[in-house]
Amino acid sequence: MPTQDEMKAALRAYVDGFANGDAESVIALFAEDAVVEDPVGTPERHGLEEIGKFYRDAVESGAKLVLDGPPRGSHGNGAAMAFTIELPALNLTIKAVDVFTFNDAGEIVTMRAYWGPDDMTS
């Protein structure tokens, strides 16, 4: 099982990937059979092909992530972070909390994003 420090480092790398416009570095954090649900309640994306398209599109849109506080770990295989998504092309910001689980290799196996209409401002 990854340590809290390893999981938190992965979440910082996730944010850094967006900051650097590097979708491939974000995608590389995920396990081959990972699942992304962003936001929760929408169809899940399964596997690196679907997840890769999702993150390439997000990074190409100019989305940037700004942490609202440090990533949080757990006593198990999960970590979470609260952040603001800035979408300049759409003049939109979204306040989100993403919850991740990791496998023993330290790869992300699930990511669930919590945000809704009340969390969006323009």
Image: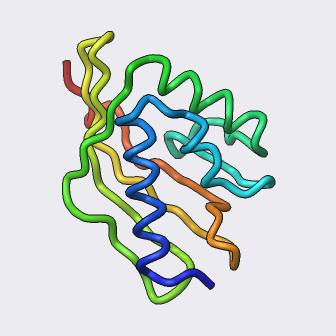
Measuring 25% from the left and 50% from the top, which residue is drawn there? 67
Whether 29 is drawn above or below 96: the answer is below
Measuring 68% from the left and 42% from the top, which residue is drawn there?
A: 44
Q: In x, y percent, where is residue 94? A: 29, 33
In the picture, measured across the screen, residue 49 lies left or right of residue 116, that is right
Residue under the point 38% across and 57% down: 12
Quarter of the image where one finds residue 51 = top right
Figure quadrant of the C terminus: top left
Question: How far from the left and from the top, in percent, is residue 31?
Answer: 73, 57
The answer to whether 68 appears left or right of 6 in the picture is left
Query: Where is residue 19 drawn, in percent x and y?
Result: 35, 36
Name the quadrant of the N terminus. bottom right
Please give the name of the residue rendered at 62% of the width and 71% of the height, measured from the top-left corner. 106
Query: How far across and down, in percent of the image, does residue 119 sit?
Result: 26, 37
Rendered image quadrant of residue 24: top right
Q: Is residue 53 left or right of residue 94?
A: right
Give left or right: position of 6 versus 97. Answer: right
Up-down: is 32 above or below 104?
above
Residue 57 higher or lower than 18, as above or below: above
Nearest the eye: 74 or 10: 10
